[in-house]
Image (cartoon, helix red, strand yellow):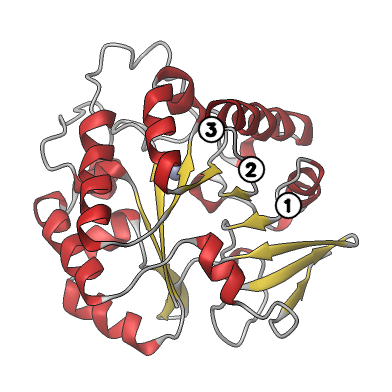
C-alpha cells in the first residue's frame, strides 16, 4: 500500500513557530505555482493524494483550498504550523479547531484527518490525541514510533489507544540507521536520499507513506540568507533533482490517498498501540 500526502505550506514555511505575518510578509507568493505543479502531476498520472493544509494558507489563499478539494481529500496541518511540543493543550485546541472550521467552511466537507507540524506529538503531548478526538478527528498521521519509544514490528497503519480513545494512525516510514531512526519518505529526507536507495527501501516494505511539500519541487524558490547552515542544508538540498525524482516515484508506484487506504484496511486486525 502506497499513500501520497501533501503538506500544503508556502515555500518559506519551513521554520516551525514563526510569525509569518510580520517578518515574511514581503516574500513572494509561490504557493499557486507550486500547488498547480503538484495537481498537474497527479492528474497526469491519475493518482490521488491527501492534502494536509495549513490554516495560514487557507485563510490567505482560499481559492487554492477550494481547487484542491474539488478532487482530493483535505486534512488539517494546524493553523500556524507551530510544533505541538511548544503549545499547551488549550493552544493546541485552538490551532486545530480554527484550521478545521476554516477548511470545512471553504470546502463544505468534514475534516477528519490531521498531521502535526514536524510530526511533533511525542511522549509529553499525548493529550493531543484527546484534543483531536474532541474535535472530530478520527485519523492522525503524525506518529513516529521512536518518539514514543514503542516497538512496533513493522511500520503499518495501527490504532492508537489513549485514555479510552482510539485514533486511526498512518505512521511515517523510517529506517534504523546506526541505531537511530531516520525518516526517508518525504520532505528534506526525500530530497536527500538518492532514488536508488529510496526505491530499495520502498520495495522492502508493504506500506509506504510519502509526504511532500509544494516547495520540495520548487527549484526556483529564493534563498533566504539569514538562516543557519544547518537550516539551509535541510531546506534547500536536492531541489534541483527533486522534481524529476518525484515524477519517477509516482510513475513507479501506484499511490492512493488516506481515504481509500482507510477503506482497504481491516482495522480489526491491525496493531493497537496503547499509550499512557
Ligand atoms: Zn509541515
User: Which of the 4 image quarters holds residue 69?
Assistant: top left
Q: Which element is circle 3 on?
A: helix
Which mark is on residue 107?
3
On the image, the x and y values in percent for residue 36 come to 24, 39
Which mark is on residue 85?
2
Q: Is residue 147 left or right of residue 29?
A: right
Q: CA distance from mark 3 to mark 2?
A: 29 Å
Q: Are the residues tagged 3 and 1 within 8 Å (C-beta)?
A: no
Q: For the point 69% across and 31% down, which residue is it?
A: 97
In this rendering, is residue 87 above or below 216? Answer: above
Q: For the point 48% across and 20% down, which residue is it?
A: 59
User: Which of the 4 image quarters holds residue 152?
Assistant: bottom right
Q: Give the mark nearer the N terminus: 3 vs 2.
A: 2
User: Which of the 4 image quarters holds residue 61?
Assistant: top left
Q: Which element is circle 1 on?
A: helix
Q: For the point 65% across and 28% down, which residue is it?
A: 101
Q: Are the residues tagged 1 and 2 within 8 Å (C-beta)?
A: yes
Q: Nearer the viewer, mark 3 or mark 1?
A: 3
**Looking at the image, which residue sits at the far right?**
164
Amino acid at each position: 500500500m502506497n499513500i501520497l500526502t501533501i503538506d500544503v505550506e508556502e515555500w518559506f514555511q519551513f521554520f516551525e513557530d514563526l510569525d509569518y505575518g510580520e517578518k515574511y510578509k514581503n516574500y513572494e507568493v509561490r504557493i499557486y505555482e507550486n500547488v498547480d505543479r503538484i495537481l498537474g502531476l497527479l492528474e497526469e498520472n491519475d493518482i490521488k493524494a491527501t492534502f494536509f493544509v495549513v490554516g495560514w494558507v487557507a485563510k490567505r489563499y482560499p481559492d487554492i483550498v477550494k481547487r484542491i478539494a474539488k478532487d482530493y481529500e483535505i486534512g488539517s496541518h494546524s493553523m500556524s504550523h507551530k510544533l505541538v511540543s511548544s503549545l499547551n493543550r488549550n493552544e493546541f485546541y485552538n490551532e486545530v479547531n480554527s484550521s478545521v472550521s476554516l477548511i470545512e467552511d471553504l470546502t463544505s466537507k468534514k475534516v477528519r484527518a490531521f498531521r502535526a507540524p514536524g510530526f511533533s506529538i511525542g511522549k509529553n503531548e499525548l493529550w493531543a490525541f484527546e484534543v483531536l478526538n474532541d474535535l472530530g478527528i478520527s485519523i492522525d498521521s503524525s506518529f513516529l514510533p521512536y518518539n514514543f519509544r514503542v516497538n512496533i514490528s513493522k511500520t503499518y497503519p495501527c490504532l492508537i489507544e489513549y485514555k479510552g480513545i482510539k485514533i486511526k494512525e498512518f505512521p511515517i516510514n523510517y529506517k534504523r540507521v546506526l541505531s537511530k531512526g531516520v525518516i526517508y519518505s518525504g520532505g528534506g529526507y526525500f530530497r536527500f536520499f538518492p532514488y536508488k536507495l529510496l526505491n530499495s527501501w520502498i520495495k522492502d516494505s508493504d506500506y509506504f507513506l510519502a509526504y511532500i511539500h509544494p516547495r520540495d519541487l520548487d527549484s526556483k524558490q529564493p534563498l533566504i540568507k539569514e538562516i543557519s547552515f544547518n537550516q539551509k542544508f535541510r531546506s534547500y538540498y536536492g531541489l534541483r533533482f527533486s522534481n524529476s525524482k518525484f515524477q519517477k516515484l509516482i510513475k513507479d508506484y501506484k499511490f492512493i490517498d488516506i481515504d481509500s487506504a482507510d477503506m482497504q484496511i481491516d482495522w480489526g486486525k491491525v496493531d493497537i498501540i496503547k499509550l499512557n
